[in-house]
Image (cartoon, rainbow, N blue to C red):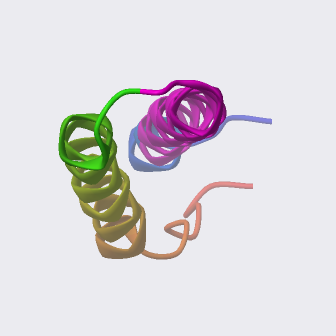
């Protein structure tokens, strides 16, 4: 059965956002592990982590703004 273009586009956008979110969360966990084992000052260790956390928040907002899947009109 055919799926409308808007539904296909929604699934592709959703998957791209989920992939980006997974990548950012992996970076957060890596930076937390590195900051726990590193002896660097706290200010320099947290600056990249805060930036990544802002990106995670923006990505989650994009996912929320994407909304629910549009209903296919065909089939």
Answer with left or right where residue 6 lies relative to residue 27.
left
User: Residue at (31%, 47%) from the top-left corner?
Assistant: 42
The percent coordinates of residue 28 (x first, y second) are 52, 40
Give the percent coordinates (x, y) of residue 61: 30, 69
Q: In the displayed structure, would residue 68 be above or below residue 62?
A: below
Q: Main secondary structure of the magenta part?
A: helix
Q: In the image, is residue 46 above or below residue 26?
A: below
* Residue at the (20%, 35%) spot, across then down: 44
Task: Give the residue displayed 57% in from the left and 70% down from the top.
Answer: 71
Residue 32 location, quadrant:
top right
Vertical relation: 35 (above or below) 55: above
> In which quarter of the view is residue 53 placed?
bottom left
Image location (x, y in percent) of residue 33: 66, 33
Q: Quadrant of the C terminus?
A: bottom right
**Relative side of 46 to 60, left or right:** left
Out of 49 and 55, give the one closest to the viewer. Answer: 49
Confirm whether the magenta stretch covers residue 23.
yes
Residue extending furthest right?
1
Q: What stretch is highlighted in magenta?
A: 10-39
Q: How many labels does the image show?
A: 0
Nearest to the observer: residue 22 or residue 65? 22
| x and y, in percent, of residue 25 in the image | 57, 41
Tell me the quadrant of the picture where the N terminus can be found. Answer: top right
Q: In this view, does 50 lie to the left or right of 13?
A: left
Foreground of the two, 69 or 4: 69
Q: Nearer the viewer, residue 21 or 3?
A: 21
Q: Confirm whether the magenta stretch covers residue 75.
A: no
């Amino acid at each position: 059965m055919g799926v409308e273009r808007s539904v296909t586009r929604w699934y592709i956008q959703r998957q791209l956002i989920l992939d980006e979110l997974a990548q950012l969360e992996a970076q957060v966990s890596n930076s937390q592990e590195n900051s726990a084992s590193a002896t660097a000052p706290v200010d320099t260790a947290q600056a990249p982590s805060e930036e990544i956390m802002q990106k995670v928040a923006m990505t989650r907002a994009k996912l929320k703004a994407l909304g629910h899947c549009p209903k296919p009109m065909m089939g």
